[in-house]
Amino acid sequence: MNTTKALQQFKDIAFHYLRELDNFSMEQLKWQPSKDEWSIGQMYQHLINSALYMHLHNIEHCIQSKNDTVSLAEKTMEGAAIFERGGFPPIRIKVPPSPQYTPEQPKSKEQLVQGINSVIHRMEETEPKLEKVSKQNTVSHPSFGALHAKEWFLLIEMHYRHHLLQLERLKKDLDRNNYA
């Protein structure tokens, strides 16, 4: 997929997330199905933070490199498969709770709206810069290995699309627990 198309698909998904926020109270956004599972609000925080502070940060690192390899690593088999498939497999990926990885509960809906809008804005600013970035300039992803700027960019759309499954599951959990 080219980056222009990925940007449009990302924006469609991001706007979907923004519209979905209208359907939840703050109590619903903070409700967790269990102590080891994220709330809808935490999932939103994860999407915002991973895009701003990991994906887009690594894209900037690739852009600022002067035609030298940032990472000598190669893409892993898992990373190659995700890009070949054009997305994550439709499975639940569970990471053990930890202070470094578990997102905080949101303070307000406005915080989430501002966060998603910030990601949209940064994606729009970043996309035109990608064409000139060498594919040799890579930064390693913890699971997928060495990714260049365009791959990091495409990963944001794939990541947001993947979490739509989690959003649907959490909405069903809310309904089952009479939070509708």
Image (cartoon, rainbow, N blue to C red):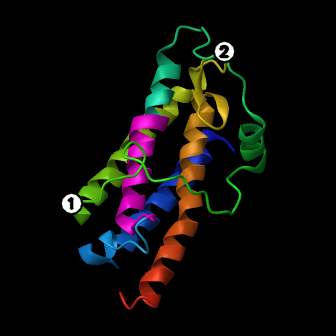
Q: Secondary structure at mark 2?
A: loop
What range of the chain is rendered magenta? 36-55
- The reply to whether discs 1 and 2 touch (Cβ–Cβ < 8 Å) is no
Question: On the rendered structure, is 80 left or right of 140?
Answer: right
Q: Which mark is residue 95?
A: none
The image shows residue 65, relative to residue 81, as above or below, that is above
Q: Earlier in the sequence, mark 1 or mark 2?
A: 2
Is residue 98 visible from the viewing direction of this image?
A: yes
Indicate the quadrant where residue 25 lies: bottom left
Q: Residue at x 21, y 60 (%)?
A: 107
Residue where numbered disc 2 is placed = 72
Residue where numbered disc 1 is placed = 107
From the viewer's side, name the closer residue of 2 and 170.
Answer: 170
Question: On the rendered structure, is 103 left or right of 37?
Answer: left
Q: Residue at x 68, y 52 (%)?
A: 87
Q: Amino acid at mark 2?
A: Leu
Query: Where does residue 79 sit, x and y in percent of width and height?
Result: 71, 39
Query: Where does residue 47 sit, x and y in percent of width and height?
Result: 44, 52
Query: Where does residue 74 sit, x and y in percent of width and height?
Result: 72, 24
Q: Residue at x 38, y 91 (%)?
A: 178
Local packing at callout 2 (Cα closer than 10 Å; few below 14, some 14-19, many 20+) is: some
Residue 40 on the magenta segment: yes
From the viewer's side, name the closer residue of 87 and 100.
Answer: 100
Local packing at callout 1 (Cα closer than 10 Å; few below 14, some 14-19, many 20+) is: few
